[in-house]
Each structure stands twice: as structure tokens, then as C-alpha cells.
Amino acid sequence: MDLAYFAEWANLLIRWLHLITGIAWIGTSFYFIGLDNQLEPPRDGNPRVKGEQWSIHGGGFYHKQKYLVAPERLPEKLHWFKWEAYWTWISGFSLFVLIYWANASTYLVDPAVLDMPAWAAVLASAALLVGGWVVYDLLCRSKLGEDEGKLSIAMVVLLVVAAFVACHLFSGRGAFLQVGAMTGTIMVANVAMVIIPGQRKMVEAMRAGQEPDPKYGRWGKQRSVHNTYLTLPVLFLMISTHYPMTFGSAWNWVVLLAIALAGALVRQYFVLRQLGRANLAYPAVAAVVVVALVFALRPAPRAGLASAEVPAMAEVQAITAARCATCHAANPTFEGIAAAPKGVHLDNPQQIRRWAQSMRQQLENEAMPPGNVTEMTPEERARLLAWVAAGAPAR
Ligand code: HEC
């Protein structure tokens, strides 16, 4: 049985599920934050109604009311929002295990960062996933949790530490996904461990004929606000693997933090806009951060590259045969690779030329070979780059 082949299918199907549930979750989450921020004072004078909103969508009119703590009587049917979040985590975690844990020596370990056995990388990754949530949750429940300002600073410090540690343990690519997984885990745990249990307590109290304790509503709201600012950074981290210029730099943990900051600022703009206090300073700062990154991360010219004579196709092919084609071939020989990754074939001149620009992207930032498993030398890297820079000549 060809395990790698079936793993590819599992990868596709789980990723598909992850996207669908993630969209559903983030969609409802953005929707309810927006609704909360745009409530208007109720017209019908029900003292329990905190605010209401009229809207039109899909050809129908909707009238939504938010109750302060709870309505007088519980309706028979109450909609809960939790499976979107749970399935996003279940699918995301499965994908992480399937790719990053099952192939830890390729995706998590980079000997140039820290040489460790695959099992140690998996153990560290798992410990960070759990540890991130435990520390975050303790912070929220501690005295700090009562002061939003101080808590926010603590959260930022936590993210800085997580980014720094992950980027000094794992390959750049693995580190970004690790921090993304940690953040995503915190977001889902907020739903599973705080928001939903709190809501259950509120419903139980009402069923018992008591007024629900408003603290559950407050706690839930606090976590839900954290989640909203984490959404954009997490989405960046999830797609970052396609962009080696971000995770491939020596200062990748700073890049991670800068882009996360830009994402949170953009989210802040939209939250304030919903409250009628739009402030363009937030996206402006985000834009400055991103533009600064674009310039800061420009690949430096490789020493001796300009003067080096352009390698011949035969030499290029010899290098890719040795360093790339174990994976990037019609029949890969590298264990765990079923078909040429991303359809990139580097085993014949025609295909090598076809993929020249993609090769440049991957080579410049040392994203390929992953973790330099095939031990490509800097000299070989420079040779391939010189060849691409010369227009990838056929001879
Ligand atoms: C150990 C196997 C392996 C080796 C060796 C390897 N690659 Fe890759 N390569 C991969 C995998 C896996 C991916 C897909 C990464 C992903 O999922 O985004 C990939 C993706 C790529 C891509 C497409 C990137 C994209 O997202 O569009 C290019 C281009 C590439 N590799 C070039 C190279 C070059 C050039 C070499 C040799 C210097 C090389 N690879 C060596 C495994 C390998």
C-alpha cells in the first residue's frame, strides 16, 4: 500500500474541510462582533433588551435583539454556535499532525536552526500547543484579567515569546505554522472551555428559575474579543507557508510579529468603524509596517553572483538531480513523497526551465530543499540563482 499517496488524499480532504469550517466559524464570529457593535437602542422599551438591529439579507428583513444577560423566559429552541469552531480545530490539528508531525524531519526540523531528532521536535511542538493555552488561560483568570489594558500587554508579550521560541526551535515554515496552530488552539479553547461552558451555566440558571450570573457573559465577551483580534494574524500564519520570503528570513520571528500586528490593526479599524469611530490611522500604520517589511526583506545580492559566469544547463541539471529531484520527479524516491510536490518537476531540462522563477523564490530564502535535507551547498545555490538571473538559458 502506498501510504504517501493516501496521505495526499487525506491532506486534500482534511484541508478542504478545514477551509469550509474555518470560513463558517470566522464568518459567524465577525458577524456577531459586528452585530454587537452596531446595536441601536431598542424601540419597544423592553428593559431587558440592550439593543437591536434591523437588516436586510438574501431578500428578507431581519430584526435582531440582544438581551442584557438574558430574556425573561428561555425560548424552546436556542441556536448554539460551536461546531464551526470545534471542527476547524479538529481538521486543523489533524492536518498539522499529518503534515508537520508525521514528516517532522522535513517540515519542523531545520538543522541550520536547531538540530534535533524528529521525535523531540514533535514533543516540543505538542508541549507548546498545550503550554500556550495554559499560560494564556492563567493570565486571563489572574488579577491581570480584570484590567483589559494590562492583559493586552501580557498577550503581546506572550505572542513575542511564542514567536521567538518557535523560530529558534523549528524551521521557519514549521515555526510559523506552529505559532498559527497555538493561536488557533487558544481561539478554539476559548470557545470550548470558557464561552460555551459559561453559556451552559447561564441556561441552567434560567431553567432553574434563577437570574444568570452576568460574569459568564463578561468572560465570554472578553474571550470573544481576543478571538476577533487574533483572526487576521492566524489567517496570515496559515497561508504563510506559500511565502518563503516571510518565514525564510533570519529575523523571521520579527516578521511574524510585524505582520500579526498589521493584521490586528486592520481588524481594529473595522471594529471601530462598526462603532462609528473609524480611524484611518490604524490601517495606515499597518500599511507602513508592511511596506517597511517589503523593503527590509528584499533578497540581498549573493556574493560573487554578478561576476560569476552563467552555469550551463548540464551543470544546473546535475545540481537539481542531486538536491531536488529526489522529491521533484515523476517518481520521487524520497520517503513520504508520493508525487512531485506542487507538480514541480525538476528532473529534465524543459521542466527545470519552466519552473526557473519558482525555483528562484524557493532558493533565495533557502526554503528549498526543506530543512536542506539534501545538503545543498551555498555554492550550488548561488550557481542556480545565477542561472535564473541570466534568464534560465537552455544551454
Ligand atoms: C525532501 C523533498 C524535497 C526536496 C529535496 C526539494 N523539495 Fe521542493 N518541495 C517539496 C515539498 C514537500 C513542496 C511543497 C511545499 C508545500 O506544501 O507548500 C515543495 C515545493 C517546491 C516548489 C513550489 C513552491 C510553491 O509553493 O509554489 C518549488 C519551486 C520547489 N519546491 C523547488 C525545489 C528546489 C529548487 C529544490 C532543490 C534545490 C527542491 N525543491 C528540493 C519537497 C522537496
Image (cartoon, rainbow, N blue to C red):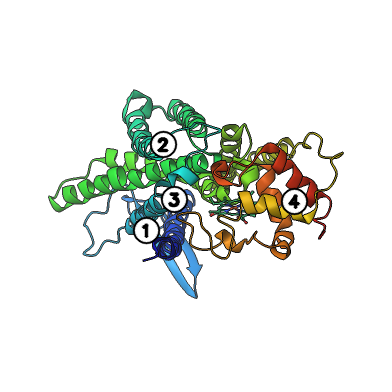
Ligand 1 closer than 8 Å to the CB at disc 3?
Answer: no
Q: Are discs 1 and 4 less than 8 Å apart at CB?
A: no
Q: Residue at x 43, y 30 (%)?
A: 148
Which labelled disc corresponds to residue 315? 4
* Image quadrant containing the N terminus: bottom left
Q: Residues within 10 Å of mark 2 (few under 14, many from 20)?
A: few
Q: Nearer the viewer, residue 31 or 326?
A: 326
Q: Residues within 10 Å of mark 4 (few under 14, many from 20)?
A: some
Q: Earlier in the sequence, mark 3 or mark 2?
A: 3
- SS at circle 1: helix
Q: Residue at x 57, y 48 (%)?
A: 240
Task: Name the residue tied to disc 1.
Answer: 84
Q: Earlier in the sequence, mark 2 or mark 4?
A: 2
Give left or right: position of 14 versus 249.
left
Identified by mark 2, the residue type is Pro
Q: Earlier in the sequence, mark 3 or mark 4?
A: 3
Is residue 303 something one can see in this rendering? yes
